[in-house]
Amino acid sequence: MAQPDGTYRLSGEWLNTESDLSYYFRADHVYMVYERPEGHVILIGQVLQNKDGQSASLILEEGFYNGFFLPKELLEELIPFTLSYETLKNLDGVEQPYLTQKDGYLQLQTK
């Protein structure tokens, strides 16, 4: 959603309506929770620029299933979402996009 200052925000509330996961954005990490009768999963990660410099992805750092650690090898294969900078440039006023994590949302800014 465009903000009065020209930045865009992807709120956790909106993302939660579009996903089976519950996302909780904080300035330092993103927490994801998935609950089913047979299990409870908690994932912790950060939105980071990919090595190619063309996109940013939510990279998982830790995960738990019913309170037990998930193996790092499994977490490395899971990428909840990726945002292409080329696609973000289609938004009004966005020339050189970059993302920052805030409490409750991701903020898209431009250089």
Image: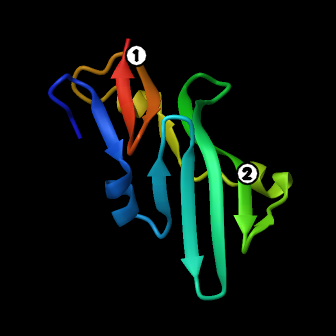
The three-letter amino acid code for the residue at tag 2 is Glu
The location of residue 2, given as percent across then percent down, is 21, 34
Left or right: 105, with 24 as reference point: left
Give the residue at mark 2: 62
Q: Which residue is rendered at x = 83% and y = 52% of the image?
A: 72
Q: Which residue is rendered at x = 37% and y = 32% of the image?
A: 107
Number of marks in the image? 2
**In the rendered image, the vertical position of residue 54 relative to residue 106, given as above or below:** above
Crowd band around label 2 with a 10 angstrom C-alpha radius: few (<14), some (14–19), many (20+): some
- CA–CA distance between discs 2 and 1? 30 Å
Identify the element where label 1 is drawn.
loop
The location of residue 83, given as percent across then percent down, is 48, 39
Left or right: 1, with 45 as reference point: left
Give the residue at mark 1: 96
**In the rendered image, the vertical position of residue 76 relative to residue 57, given as above or below:** below
Q: Quadrant of the C terminus?
A: top left
The numbered mark, 2 or 1, whose residue comes first in the sequence reads: 2
Identify the element where label 2 is drawn.
strand
Q: Which residue is rendered at x = 54% and y = 46% of the image?
A: 30
Q: Which residue is rendered at x = 38% and y = 52% of the image?
A: 12
Residue 44: assigned label: none
- Tell me how the rendering is colored: rainbow
The location of residue 95, given as percent across then percent down, is 34, 16
Left or right: 85, with 66 as reference point: left
Mark 2 or 1, closer to the camera: 2
The three-letter amino acid code for the residue at tag 1 is Gln
